[in-house]
Amino acid sequence: MADPTSPTSRPAAAPAAAGDLPQSRHLATELPGPRSRALMDRKTSAVASGVGTTVPVFAVRAGGGVVEDVDGNRLVDLGSGIAVTTVGASHPAVVAAVQEQVAAFTHTCFMVTPYEPYVAVAEKLNEVTPGDHAKKTALFSSGAEAVENAVKIARHATGRDAVVVFDHAYHGRTNLTMAMTAKAMPYKSGFGPFAGEVYRAPTSYPFRDPQGMTGEQAAQRAVRVIEAQVGADQVACVVIEPVQGEGGFIEPAPGFLPALAAWCRENGALFVADEVQTGVARTGDWFACDHEGVVPDLVVVAKGVAGGMPLSAVTGRAELVDAVHTGGLGGTYGGNPVACAAALAALEAVETDGLLQRARDVEVLVKGRLHALAERDPRVGDVRGRGAMLAVELVGEDGTTPAPALAAGVAAAAKAQGVIVLTCGTAGNVLRFLPPLSISDELLHDAFDVLDAAFAATSASTR
Ligand code: PLZ
């Protein structure tokens, strides 16, 4: 390996393939180890400090349920690179498809000379997204870019301007999607002015809503805000994460999404599901909307769709998507052929590897561990989520005050023992678990043993 302390060193020529990566947690050094610390020094001098890092170890290989670092440590992955490597970080079929495509050509630009993999991804997404109506798809590169394009389509198709989003929403970091995202720090502070015609409504948050509030009642609360403050006939689209991600893994009360979708239908607004984090088997269905049989007009897909390659999509009712004039949608890299090849392999793996069922099995195992923890530890205020998108919300002694320092403390203790855990939540007091579906039960149990110990070791005063 090249000397990572040398500022002129180049990455090692070819990292070993991940196929034989041992599926066990292993601490060869303290974390971060010396090579990671040296690389972090280089990062600090060369990389914009606005780009943060959650776990300060530098990866060399990842696959199954493990990330291996430059010091030979193996960490258990409960983050999937923020819900991306759902099929695994080096799924053999994805690796083979990428290698084959990259050897044929890397890029022509679909808008210049098209290629079949783009069309095949569109066909597949038209098939697996909710609803059996005629659909069309456009491909992009990032989640935020796809959200922006869903708004463009909705505005064009309805001739209206207003975009309704929700408390605790996360939709991205571009100018329009910053406006749509709820949380100021770190996403918005200092980055304004933001795009106009974006309005925020209250969401359904069972843990914090008045006790017994139904999904329908929460939807009525949102509708009252929309009708009074925006005007029903001004709304181009209502954009919602069916399970909110960065905002705290908030699962709305049953009935909330169907009632909102019905209101959209009655009022000529499009119901847009941002399934960037929830989509493609993550919640135990192809899409989180499937859980309640909700059929969005447009679905935004990214992250898990392409096995780790950058690809995103808007899929929706053919007549709405086609309302946009030719040339109105696109981008140099949108639907890059290598990313499309990866997506075809990843989408097939969802079926061949039985990943919808695997996500449901992960839910049973992890929720078992989390409920047991919550019974022992009153600082765990809520256990929630679906499939392999699970979380605990941590609170103070009163059972409601958010406890972000505790979440940070537990996450730090787990990371020091080689378990990658992410936090989230508008108040930063939620620990979220997003393992790749290629992880073994043994690794999950090992990781939650580490988490139990991290809770026990993190003092009650860390609130
Ligand atoms: N919509 C629902 O979860 C990305 C963001 C991490 P991009 N979530 C992770 C960070 O701090 O930047 C996300 C999402 C939902 C849209 C996005 C945006 O997707 O691919 O990051 O642009």
Image: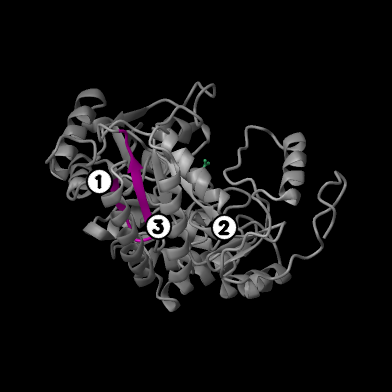
Which residue reaches farthest bottom?
352
Residue 26, percent from left and from top? 61, 63
Q: Compared with residue 356, is residue 154 higher up or lower down, i.e. above or below?
A: above
Query: The residue tagged with tag 1: helix, strand or loop?
Result: loop
Majority secondary structure in the magenta region: strand
Tell me the residue that label 3 is attached to: 279
**Tag 3 near tag 1, CB within 8 Å:** no
Q: Which mark is residue 252?
A: 1
Mark 2 vs mark 1: which is more N-terminal?
A: 1
Q: Position of residue 42 (x, y in %)?
A: 77, 41
| Amino acid at pointer 1 | Pro
Q: CA distance from mark 3 to mark 1?
A: 16 Å
From this viewpoint, is residue 145 visible? no
The residue segment tinted magenta is 382-396
Front disc: 3 or 1? 1
Residue sitting nearer the eye, 225 or 366: 366
Nearer the observer, 231 or 329 = 231
Is there CB contact under 8 Å for labels 3 and 2?
A: no
The N terminus - image quarter: bottom right
Residue 335 circle label: 2
